[in-house]
Image: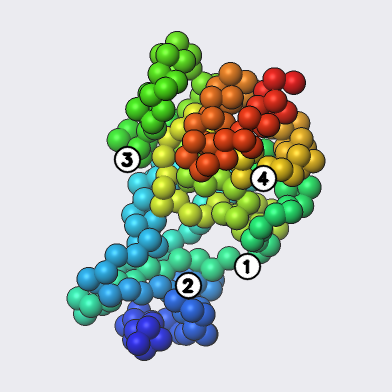
Amino acid sequence: MKEEALRAVAHELDLNVQSIDGDYAVVDFPQAHTIGELCVEETSTTHPLFDEYKVQERVFRVMKDFRFFQLCLPAVYGMGCVDDKWDWVLRKRYTGETYAHAPYPQTLAREMAVLVFDLSQVPVLKFKKDVVSVNYTEQAPEFADFFARSVPTLYCITNGACIPESLIHLEESIVLNNWTNARIVALEEIVAELILHVYPDTVWLDMFMRELSNYVDVNSEWLEYMLLCCASRNGKVDAAQKCIQQYVKK
């Protein structure tokens, strides 16, 4: 059923199908001189990919004019509907190194630091109301007094999962995928989530923190509270306490 739909939509869009790979078709996209991935879903259903594309439209409208050191925004060429039955999204197909799980290469520590720096360079006020801003007092009312008297280094746009598994490593840049949960957060939250995700690989984290210090100033007090907030969401409280001793209190 899905393969038939993929081939039918590709025919309507005048795209040549190279192969069917699971839920998408690999297609020639001559207008962009590239290879694309065509995804289709029945119009009556919802699918994370289509939600992600709608978010990307709002987020990338602001970010597309920035020049980044490392960050590459995933290209999506369009979406539409065929015969009032099939929704489709056509995105660029990237071929590069991916990171399915730890351990991660040590060279990635510096590149992740540069990626965090790239995200920090986008003025969040430009997003207006297109992207949700985290309200930390509501999210973690037990720390309301701290949030009332302190501010982070700065607020940043994030895809919601700035971790190695969201990356495709190209020759000269890194594609950051998975923008469905894009939001504006404290810089320290991005760092805290990455620390908890990679822990207990302290060798890699030591390298990442050293590299990060070359690009941004991290507010240690905010990093501590962000580690606690992130840990309360993902159940890594013990790991957060150890990371606080390792990267905040030392």
The kind of secondary structure element at disc 3 is loop
Q: Name the residue at 36% across, 74% down.
A: 40
SS at mark 4 in the image? helix
The residue drawn where x is 35% and y is 46% is 58
- Report the disc number at residue 37: 2
Distance Cα–Cα, label 4 vs label 2: 30 Å
Crowd class of label 4 (few under 14; some 14 to 19; many from 20; radius 10 Å): some
- Mark 4 or 1, which is nearer the eye? 4
- Residue 33 visible in this rendered orientation of the protein: no
Residue displayed at 76% across by 35% down:
206
Residue at 67% over, 23% down: 248
Do the residues bearing badges 4 and 1 touch, measured as CB atoms within 8 Å?
no
Question: Which mark is drawn over residue 95?
Answer: 1
Which mark is drawn over residue 198?
4
Q: Nearer the viewer, residue 178 or 231?
A: 231
Q: Amino acid at mark 4?
A: Val
Q: Where is residue 126, by image quadrant?
A: top left
Mark pair 3, 4: CA separation: 30 Å
Q: Amino acid at mark 3?
A: Asp
> Which badge, 1 or 3, comes first in the chain's sequence?
1
Circle 2: element type: strand
Q: Which amino acid, by three-letter code, is at mark 2?
A: Glu
Disc 3 target residue: 130
Considering only order in the chain, which callout, 1 or 4, is on the residue closer to the N terminus?
1
Is residue 182 among the parts visible in the rendering?
yes
